[in-house]
Image (cartoon, rainbow, N blue to C red):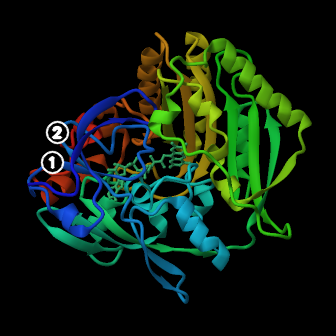
Amino acid sequence: MIDGLVRDTRFTTFDGTLSLATKHQRPDRFSHLESPDSTLHRIPRGGGYSYSASSFGENSLVQEMTCFNRFIDFNSETLTLKLEAGVRLIDLMKWALPRQLHFPVLPGYPLITVGGCVAADVHGKNPYKDGTFSDWVKQLTVFHPQKGYQSCSPEENSTLFAMTCGGYGLTGVITDVTLQLATLPTPWIALSQHRVGSLEEAVRELSSCDADIAYSWHDAAAGSNFGRGIVYVGQWTKNGALPKPMKYHPMTANTRARLPISAWNGLTARVANSAVLLQARYKSKISVKGVMAASFPFATNVYFHKLFGRPGLRETQFLVSEDKMGECSHALQKLVCDTGAPTMMLSLKRFKGVQKSLSMSGTGYLVAIDSYRNARTDLFMHRLDQLILDVGGQPNLSKDSRMPGEVAELSIASFAQFKQGLFAYDAARTMRSELSRRIGLS
Ligand SMILES: Cc1cc2nc3c(=O)[nH]c(=O)nc-3n(C[C@H](O)[C@H](O)[C@H](O)COP(=O)(O)OP(=O)(O)OC[C@H]3O[C@@H](n4cnc5c(N)ncnc54)[C@H](O)[C@@H]3O)c2cc1C
């Protein structure tokens, strides 16, 4: 008998392109986490904000960890905080800010959980300066139904630690994580924006930028405006009183998709992108934002995602080495403009680090592309896969819900090592998701 209220639930990827019903449990105590038959296939889930089906799959019990949300221990000398894996980033920041503390690697949405951030080894606003999430993890505990609770860190049980950070839940359920926090310089960030004419110009700006936050946004609609964009640069600044609490309406994969049709198409994409570029010309070049608003831009700005409606969107992110970035920009512009691709916007971030596990990490530039869905989308994505392979790019598995297994295998440097380690660790491959099946890890 399975306890912990197991029911059938339909899950949908955040991009809205894949949906299926499976068994679902939301354990609120360790005995529930442990109780299902230990041979049952399962997969952990956090907030459900992955664009790919990495936290659900056919015939896998989904163990949603959002009730494991307690703060366990804080060491004020080392600034290390131990918390349960289901703690949401907004709650981490609400705890940290009044104590003049900060967590530097924050992805763009506040309801993402710490466990989901470790498992996808996510990045924040400046991965060149701050690395990826796992660079700030000191220790964690993983529960595997046949192996029990295993503590691991870069020093202890280091192979399991390395496979769990960026391992998409395939080594087991992370129950707690010890994070390294940083001192908060001030709770305010001055965000400046200025226009650039091309991807190459943005790369030049980002490569010489030493700011705390640095990324760019670009018009990616096919046409003469392709590549025009805005470089955003943020620095800590003093601004008197504490920022007001951030107000927002939570968005989930289901509420994102309420609109029955997509409002984005070639025309609306061009109009919206021109409006963004125009406001950058006239609006004040510097805006001062609270650290929460600067860290979680998609909390208050939900229209971009919601207007893709029920048909959903396609996103691809990949990391390209600095020396291949020129070739990549050129090939991308040619691909989009020659084929009239359904692309809408593009974003760049600079990275520094070493590639590990399945995580999108290493040194180079992240290229993120969002497309609306029409008859040309799948062909475009297929051609983009080839472009990624041609420029030696490394894809982000949490952002692309259809990336074929052979592309992942050829493009992620540690893929073979990860696969070998995973099958040696758990030959029965107990933890399974649609992602793990698609890329040959089940
Ligand atoms: C609006 C928006 C903005 C985003 N911005 C960024 C960004 O700036 N940078 C970035 O890198 N990503 C970004 N993301 C993607 C997001 O950070 C990742 O998909 C993240 O993994 C989602 O975490 P989650 O808690 O929602 O986990 P889920 O989506 O539920 O799960 C993601 C993966 O984590 C695993 N997992 C979850 N909890 C656990 C656990 N306790 N133990 C073991 N494995 C677990 C799951 O099995 C799955 O493989 C964004 C997503 C959205 C929707």
Viewport quadrant of the N terminus: bottom left
Front residue (pair 171, 130)? 171
Indicate which disc, 1 or 2, sits on the residue closer to the N terminus: 1
Going by the picture, which residue comes out furthest to the bottom? 77
Residue 73: image location, x then y, percent = 44, 82
- At 58% from the left and 56% from the top, the residue drawn is 127
Can residue 328 be seen in this snapshot? no
Front residue (pair 364, 107)? 107
> Which residue, given by chain and number where applicable, does mark 1 sit on?
41
- At 9% from the left and 56% from the top, the residue drawn is 37
Which secondary structure lies at badge 2? loop
Drawn side of residue 223 relative to residue 258, left or right: right
**Label 1 close to label 2 by CB (< 8 Å):** yes
**Neighbours of disc 2 within 10 Å: few (<14), some (14-19), many (20+):** some
Which secondary structure lies at badge 1? loop
Drawn side of residue 6 relative to residue 295, left or right: left
> Which residue, given by chain and number where applicable, does mark 2 sit on?
59
Amino acid type assigned to the residue bearing label 2 in the image: Asn
Drawn side of residue 108 relative to residue 281, left or right: left
Residue 51: image location, x then y, percent = 43, 38
Going by the picture, which residue comes out furthest to the front? 5
Front residue (pair 158, 58)? 58
Q: Is residue 32 above or below residue 120?
A: below
Q: Is residue 265 above or below residue 423?
A: above
Residue 71: image location, x then y, percent = 45, 74
* Residue 243 picture quarter: bottom right
Viewport quadrant of the C terminus: top left
Amino acid type assigned to the residue bearing label 1 in the image: His
Front residue (pair 1, 109)? 1
